[in-house]
Image: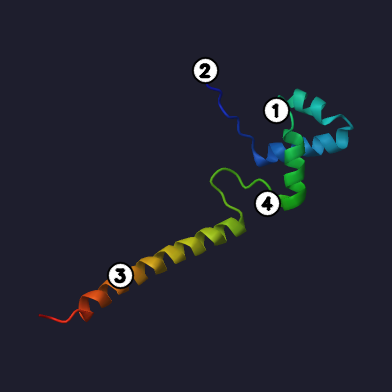
Amino acid sequence: MTTKKRTYSAEFKQEAVRLWETSGKSAMAIERELGITHGLLNKWKRKLKDEGEAAFPGQGHLTPEQEKIRQLERKLAIAEQERDILKKAVAIFSNPKS
């Protein structure tokens, strides 16, 4: 039997962390009340602290840094393809005709 991976919205994660910080309850108690896996609150709190509002971009959304990397990798791939085409063209036109 397979288990389905649950996904949580950014708002849910932020509210869960806020609830933990303001309620005075332990992380384990909050996790039990919300029905989330043990250790998620600590993970979410750490990510929220490190990345701020950009902490939970959502499925399919990239952080600005990740988007920039994706664009640069795409440009590099195009430049490499162009270079390979030019190498082949030079090889074709530099052969002396018999």
Crowding at dot 1, Cα within 10 Å, few <14 / some 14-19 / many 20+, comes out as few
Q: Name the residue under label 3.
A: 85
Q: What residue type is labelled 1?
A: Thr
Quarter of image, res 13: top right
Q: Mark 2 points at which residue?
A: 1
x and y, in percent, of residue 47 in the image? 72, 46
Looking at marks 2 and 1 on the same chain, the residue that comes earlier in the sequence is marked by 2
Quarter of the rendering containing residue 29: top right
The amino acid beneath tag 4 is Ala
Q: What element carries label 2?
A: loop
Q: Could you tell me which secondary element the residue under label 3 belongs to? A: helix
Q: What residue type is labelled 3?
A: Ile
Q: Which of marks 3 and 4 is in front?
A: 3
What count of labels does the image hold? 4
Badge nearest the viewer, 1 or 4 = 1
Residue where numbered disc 4 is placed: 54
Q: Distance between the residues labelled 3 and 4?
A: 40 Å
Q: Circles 2 and 1: CB distance less than 8 Å?
A: no
Lower sequence index among marks 2 and 3: 2
Identify which residue, 14 or 76, lies in the foreground: 76
Give coordinates of residue 17: x percent, y percent.
78, 38
Q: In this view, does 27 lie to the left or right of 55?
A: right
**Separation of disc 2 and disc 4 at Cα?**
35 Å
Q: Distance between the residues labelled 1 and 3?
A: 52 Å
The residue most toward the right is 24
Identify the mark nearer the N-term, 2 or 4.
2
At 66% across and 45% down in the image, what residue appears?
56
Provide the secondary structure element on which disc 1 rests.
loop
In the image, which is nearer the foreground, mark 1 or mark 3?
A: 3
> Type of residue at label 2?
Met
